[in-house]
Image (tube, rainbow, N blue to C red):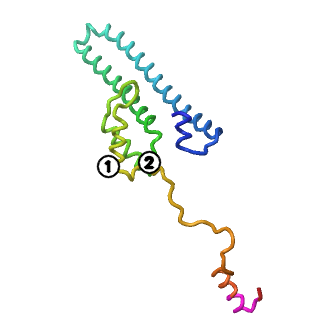
Amino acid sequence: MKREEVKGIVPGITDEQLAQIMDLHGADIERQKQIITTLTTERDAARAQLGEANKKLEGYDPEWKSKAEEAQKDADLKVQGLQREYALKEQTAALKFSSESARKAFLADLSAKELPMQDGKLLGLDDFVKTYKEGDPAAFASDEKPPRFSAAATGATGGGASAKDQANAAFRAVFGHKG
């Protein structure tokens, strides 16, 4: 997320508000990067342990190689899943939904689509969003401001007392108040 993008989405945002938003977003990104780094480190440590264990198992278990490959595939799938989840959240963060349920349904449909990834980016995301907006436009919040149906009157009403003032005067007269 870039400062220019936020200014485009939220006109009139102050530099202080923008800095707070960017700080929060930066903290989220750093947390996700830390999780990925931790998982990558754990995966690499598991690979090293697996290599050592494989040397010991060569003489004991004839199926050790297939078991090791299966464990490697599982670890890689977990890392890819985390990277995909992070990319989904990051690349759809700017979309405005009409409700939290609409956002969850969109993300579920997007996840089920299993778009290919390249360099941490989902390929075909823009086409998916366009198609989704055409299929379910109510899921997205409108960028237009709702029309204003009434406004406070400023100035004179142009013809003496208003209906409200006349009604109040009538009540005062019935109850004997002058005013």
Q: Residue furthest right?
A: 178
Q: Which is more foreground, mark 2 or mark 1?
A: 1
Residue at x-position 51% and y-position 60%:
147
Is residue 38 highlighted in magenta? no
User: Residue farthest to the front?
Assistant: 158
Q: Horizontal and vertical percent for residue 13?
A: 61, 43
Marked residue nearer the N-terminal end (2 or 1): 2
Residue 96 in picture, x, y percent from top left: 46, 46
Q: Main secondary structure of the magenta part?
A: helix
Helix, strand, or loop for circle 1? helix
Give the percent coordinates (x, y) of residue 161: 68, 81
Query: Closer to the camera, 94 or 47?
Result: 94
**Numbered tag placed on residue 97 in the rendering:** 2
Counting other residues with Cα less than 10 Å from the Cα at mark 2, is it few (<14), some (14-19), or many (20 or more)? some
Quadrant in the picture for residue 17: top right
Q: Secondary structure at mark 2?
A: loop
What is the spatial separation of the Cα atoms under label 2 and label 1, in whole angstroms? Answer: 14 Å
Instruction: Please identify the quarter of the rendering in which residue 27 is found.
Output: top right
Residue 132 image position (x, y, % from top left): 34, 45
Residue that appears at 29% across and 10% down: 57
Q: Amino acid at mark 2?
A: Phe
Taking the image as shown, residue 3 lies to the left or right of residue 137, namely: right
Around disc 1, counting alpha carbons within 10 Å, would you say few (fewer than 14), some (14 to 19), or many (20 or more)? Answer: few
Q: Residue flagged by tag 1: what amino acid is it?
A: Gly
Which segment is the magenta one? Answer: 170-177
Q: Which residue is mark 1?
A: 135
Marking on residue 60: none
The residue sitting at the left extreme is: 62
